[in-house]
Every structure is written in structure tokens, then in C-alpha cells.
Image: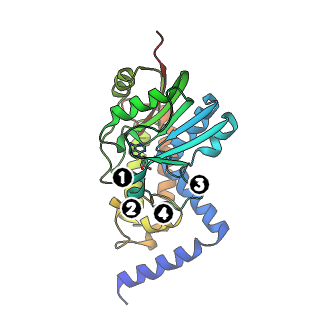
Amino acid sequence: MSQGAKSTGAMGVLQSALKFGPVQRTARRTADWVDLQYSLLLEQIAKAAPRARGRLLDVGCGDKPYEPTFRPYVTEYIGIEHESVFAQTNASTGARRPDLYYDGSRLPFEDASFDTVLSIQVLEHTPRPMPLLHEMARVLRPSGLLILSAPFSARLHEEPFDFFRYTPHGLRAMCGEAGLEVTEVWDQGNLWSVIGHKLNSFLAFRVAGIQGLAVEMGKHTQETSLGPDSKSRPWSLPFVVPAMVAIAGGARVLDRVAPDLTETLSYMVFARHRAG
Ligand SMILES: C[S@@+](CC[C@H](N)C(=O)[O-])C[C@H]1O[C@@H](n2cnc3c(N)ncnc32)[C@H](O)[C@@H]1O
């Protein structure tokens, strides 16, 4: 039997094991924790959610993963998606779906009709981010809050709909142009999380080649750039998984004890309409 056939067999066993609830839950929890981009974003979302209120619009909502976190704080949660981009990039089979679709030009709502506008990791996916930001500002009430997260350092994803990365200065300038004022900026980890995330991505996808397993667990379903599992090495997992856990833990500690704020995975900004 060839090496490739052996790998496919071992990968098949792992994929079958993942169909069992307890195995799947443990694997998913571990995969989420070592995925610093995902776990640090979820921590930010949980911290930001109590600031939301009233009617909330989630622009570029995907399969609305943050709805349960925001629900306790808002009266209504509406998720909208760009119809054609969503159809081409989001292969998710998540239980929640967008409430509405639009053509990417005008959000189908009256001016000033939302108390909170949420947009998480969307601004890099449109070739015309300024008109989208103008639309978010238009539908936001004068007293409303925009919560927006956009990547500073992320690998290519949802290709070819991956156009930009953002700095806090760029986000401030863009919000300003849309009539909004950024009141706070949060970074999502710093240098060590960036290094840790890149290392863990390399170990998972280039060394162990477990993109198929990740998709099986509902992760990275839109990352076509990762390619198929042709080079999967499931036998490396007993070494790779502990290394990834140590890297993720070490990065979190180093971010605190030796911070370097010139790097981060992503920025989350809070913005309001400019007074006067
Ligand atoms: C990386 S996904 C993020 C999805 C979701 N916000 C999340 O965090 O899981 C980016 C999403 O932005 C959507 N998108 C791209 N351009 C858009 C636009 N102009 N208006 C609204 N959504 C858009 C895509 O369809 C895609 O679902």
C-alpha cells in the first residue's frame, strides 16, 4: 500500500471518529482554542455585546454566528448578506441563515433605522468599502453605535473576494469620511498572537494537512485557498496538536508580558455619528 493510501485510511478513521458527539465536541473546543484568530475574536465579541441595544443590523452576517451572544442585549437582530458574494463564498451549512439578501449597493432600510450596526470581518471582502461604510452610517440612528471588526493580518480567505487589510488610522479616516467618529479601538492580540496564529496555521494546514478535518468540524469552510487534503499527514497529529496548544498558550502569555502593539490580527472599532 502506498504512503498516500495509508494517509487516506488514517484520515478516514479520524473523520469517522469525529462523527461521535463527545469526540467532535472535544476536537472542536481544542481547534477553536488553538485558532487564535477565531478564539480572540469571540472573546472580543463577548466583551462588546453588552454595548449593543435596540434594533441591531449585522451587515455581512454569514450564518449569524454572533446572534446568541448579542440577543440578550437587543430587541431585534437582523442579518443581511450580499446575495451573490454569499452564494459564491459561504458554503456553510450552519443552522442560522441570513434574514435578508441585497445586491451590495443600497441596504434596503430607511435612514436612521438601527440602534446598533455590527459588521464583523466584512470590510476586507468588498472592492468598494467606502460606499458600504456610508450605507452603515446612513441606517444608523444619530445616537446609534457601529461595532466593526476588520483584519490587519490575516491569510488570504474567501478568494477572490479578499481585497484589503486595515490599520486603526485607516479605519478612523474611513469612518470620518462616512460621518462617524471612532470612539474606541481594540486590538485582537498583538505580535505574539500574530506569530502564534501563523505558526499554528502552518502546522495544521501545511504540516498535518488537516483542512478536511477542519471543514468536518465546521471550521474554515470558505477557505478554498487551503486546497484539498492531498498531503494530509494524520500520523503527525500526536506531535502537531500538543505543539499547537503550547504555541497558542505561549502567545497569549507573551502578549501580556512582552506586548508589541505594532502588530495584531484584527481591529475592532466602536464609532458614533459625529456630533454637530
Ligand atoms: C469572512 S465572512 C464573515 C461572516 C460573518 N460576519 C462572520 O464573522 O462569521 C465575510 C462575509 O461578508 C459578506 N460580504 C461581502 N461583501 C459584502 C457586502 N458588500 N455587503 C454585505 N456583506 C458582504 C460575504 O458574503 C461573507 O459572508
Q: Which residue is mark 1?
A: 157
Q: Dot 3, crowdedness within 10 Å: few (<14), some or many (≥20)?
A: some
Image quarter (top left, top right, bottom left or bottom right) of the N terminus:
bottom left
Q: Secondary structure at mark 1?
A: loop
Exactly how many numbered labels are in the figure? 4
Q: Residue at x 41, y 20 (%)?
A: 179
Q: Is mark 1 within 8 Å of ligand 1?
A: yes
Badge nearest the viewer, 1 or 4: 1
Residue 84 visible at all? yes
Looking at the rendered structure, the kind of residue marked 1 is: His
Disc 4 and disc 2: Cα gap in Å?
Answer: 9 Å
Q: Which residue is mark 3?
A: 96
Q: Secondary structure at mark 2?
A: helix
Disc 1 and disc 4: Cα gap in Å?
Answer: 15 Å
The reply to whether the C-beta atoms of the residues labelled 2 and 1 are less than 8 Å apart is: no
- Seen from the viewer's position, the closer of residues 194 and 236 is 194
Q: Dot 1, crowdedness within 10 Å: few (<14), some or many (≥20)?
A: some
- Seen from the viewer's position, the closer of residues 122 and 15 is 122
Going from N to C along the chain, the mark reached first, 2 or 1, is 1
Q: Position of residue 32 (x, y in %)?
A: 54, 53
Q: Which residue is mark 2?
A: 205
Looking at the rendered structure, the kind of residue marked 3 is: Arg
- Seen from the viewer's position, the closer of residues 161 and 22 is 161
Going from N to C along the chain, the mark reached first, 1 or 4, is 1
Q: Position of residue 116 (x, y in %)?
A: 56, 30
Vertical side of 224 occupied by 196: above or below: above
Looking at the rendered structure, the kind of residue marked 4 is: Ala
Going from N to C along the chain, the mark reached first, 1 or 3, is 3
- Seen from the viewer's position, the closer of residues 199 and 35 is 35
Q: Position of residue 203 (x, y in %)?
A: 40, 59
Q: Residue at x 38, y 52 (%)?
A: 85
Say the numbered circle drawn on residue 214.
4
